[in-house]
Amino acid sequence: MEKAQISSSDETLRPNKIIGRPEVQPNPNLIMIIHKKVLESNKA
C-alpha cells in the first residue's frame, strides 16, 4: 500500500516539476499553452 502511494505521488510530482509550478495541477492543455509561449518567446 505504501509503495503504491509513493509511486503515485511521484507521478503527480513529475509534471509539476516540468511546468515549474507545484501549485498547478498537471494538465496536457496547460503544458501545450506553456510550450507555445516558450516557442513564441524564442522567436521574439
Image (cartoon, rainbow, N blue to C red):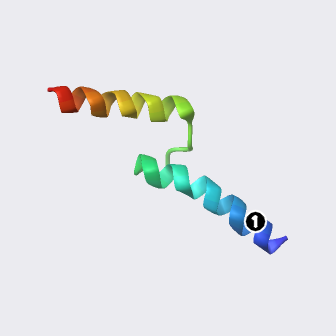
Q: Quadrant of the C terminus?
A: top left
Whether residue 22 appears in this view of the structure is no
Q: Residue at x 28, y 30 (%)?
A: 39
Q: Residue furthest toward the right? A: 1
Q: Residue at x 70, y 64 (%)?
A: 7
- Give the mark count: 1
Residue 26 placement: quadrant: top right
Q: Position of residue 34 (x, y in %)?
A: 38, 34
Q: Residue at x 62, y 53 (%)?
A: 12
Q: Position of residue 32 (x, y in %)?
A: 45, 30
Q: Position of residue 35 (x, y in %)?
A: 38, 33
Q: Residue furthest toward the left? A: 44
Q: Quadrant of the N terminus?
A: bottom right
Residue 10 placement: quadrant: bottom right
Q: Is residue 2 left or right of residue 18?
A: right
Q: Pointer 1: residues within 10 angstroms few (<14), some, or many (20+)?
A: few
Residue 15 vs 28, above or below: the answer is below
Whether residue 5 appears in this view of the structure is yes
Instruction: Work out whether residue 3 or residue 22 is closer to the camera in this orientation and state it.
Output: 3
Q: Is residue 4 left or right of residue 36?
A: right
Residue 36 placement: quadrant: top left
Q: Position of residue 40 (x, y in %)?
A: 25, 26
Instruction: Work out whether residue 6 or residue 22 is closer to the camera in this orientation and state it.
Output: 6
Q: Is residue 8 left or right of residue 28?
A: right
Q: For mark 1, give the secondary structure.
A: helix
Residue 27 vs 36, above or below: the answer is below
The amino acid type of the residue labelled 1 equals Gln
Q: Which residue is mark 1?
A: 5
Q: Residue furthest toward the bottom? A: 2
